[in-house]
Amino acid sequence: MQKVAPPAPAAYRPLWIIILSAGLIVGIAMGLRQVAGLYLPPMTRELGIGREPFSNAMAIANLMWGAGAVFAGMIADRYGAGRVVVTGALATMIGTYLMYAAQSGFDLLVSGVFLGIGVSGTGITSLVGAVGRASPPEQRTAAIAALGMAGGIGGFVAFPYTHVLMDLLGWKASLLVLVATCAVMLPLALPLSGKPQAEAGVVKAQSLGEAFREAFTHPSYLLLVTGFFVCGFHVAFYSVHLPAFVADKGLDNSVAVIALTMVGLANLAGTYIAGQSARFVEKRKGLSFIYFGRCFVFLGLLFLPITPATVILLSTLLGFLWLSTVPLTSSLVATFFGTTWMSMLFGVVFLSHQVGSFVGLRLAGYLYDMTKSYDAMWWISIALGLFAALVHSPIRERPVARLEPKPA
């Protein structure tokens, strides 16, 4: 009997196939992650719980996503992203079903654990290395930006998709349809299977321990890790609590759906611009601009009249600054250390992002239940935005000595 050949390494496949498969997976995973906030009002009413338990469950999901991203990246860098995607898709299906079956705040926490593990295997962090290794250095930032754009498309499609399902079937039955939607990711993992090849031009392969030691003694990498905490704080708080904030202001639920859809749509342009800007502007400067720009959106939500037009306009502006941090941050990791352990090292940066998500969601639920207002959260978001803009300024955008060209 003739033996079946193992899957070809991802490096031997055309770049467009790798980007297309990875982009579709990221679009589905990120889209379904972002719609969680739509379920906050109906679930908390039906289960008879406050906003804090739901927010805590989403916080746990984000924390598990961050912790899992490091291990998922490690496995993807060593053995290929295909098996990581399959595991993540199955975990997402389980977590979504447990959300459907939840009867208490504790049930939601268990659901959050599985949802976090799931997106750690199907989100940008586990796939950025596969795309980065397949791309020539001069195209790498733009190729990674395509993943961020895919996440924006996922949000743009997922919000109206989920909203229609909730209207037609009810919030509970709509979750079963989302379980089936997650299954689409399973066959998309095939083009990403296969063990990654060694990075071209590297004489000695770097071990896992060497990669960690090098990264955690690199000042610019540590600044990058610190700054990405703020991105997670902003994104998680806004995406999960905006529907509740809109409802508190007496606006229709459709306003939040349109606003978050516009975030996803504007993110396409913002991420594309960020990916292209790396050719002309230092990535650290682009990141400082993004974080500083977010402050004005949060100021608008504090001082402008809250109308449908205001919420949608400010959300659109925020969308330009949404996932545009991802191509700049992840390509800085590749600039520092190369692509051999790129998914894992970006996973560490992303863990900081998810710790920020956890803190943002945990704090938002606590402060709202205590004050019945989100004003304190907007001010905290502004202060953190200014902090992140300053943190990225001292970053030195050059490779470690190990990767610098040797003199002839």
Image (cartoon, helix red, strand yellow):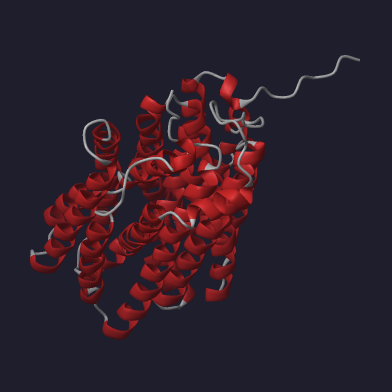
The residue drawn where x is 37% and y is 26% is 139
- Give the side of residue 203 with respect to residue 303, left or right: right
The residue drawn where x is 23% and y is 52% is 288
Please tell me whether residue 273 is drawn above or below residue 96 in the rendered image.
above
The residue drawn where x is 44% and y is 39% is 334
Please tell me whether residue 9 is drawn above or below residue 181 in the rendered image.
above
> Is residue 123 visible in the rendered structure shown here?
no
The front one of 318 and 345 is 345
Task: Provide residue 87's location: percent of width, then percent of height.
Answer: 65, 46
Residue reaching furthest to the right:
1
Task: Provide residue 142's location: percent of width, then percent of height.
Answer: 35, 30
Residue reaching furthest to the front:
408
Task: Locate residue 301: give its quadrant.
Answer: bottom left
Please tell me whether residue 190 is drawn above or below residue 14 in the rendered image.
below
The residue drawn where x is 36% and y is 45% is 326
- Give the side of residue 230 with respect to residue 304, left or right: right
> Is residue 341 visible in the rendered structure shown here?
yes
Looking at the rendered image, the quarter that the C terminus falls into is top left
The front one of 176 and 352 is 352
Looking at the rendered image, the quarter that the N terminus falls into is top right
Task: Locate residue 386: give its quadrant.
Answer: bottom left
- Give the side of residue 168 with respect to residue 119, left or right: left
Residue reaching furthest to the bottom:
370
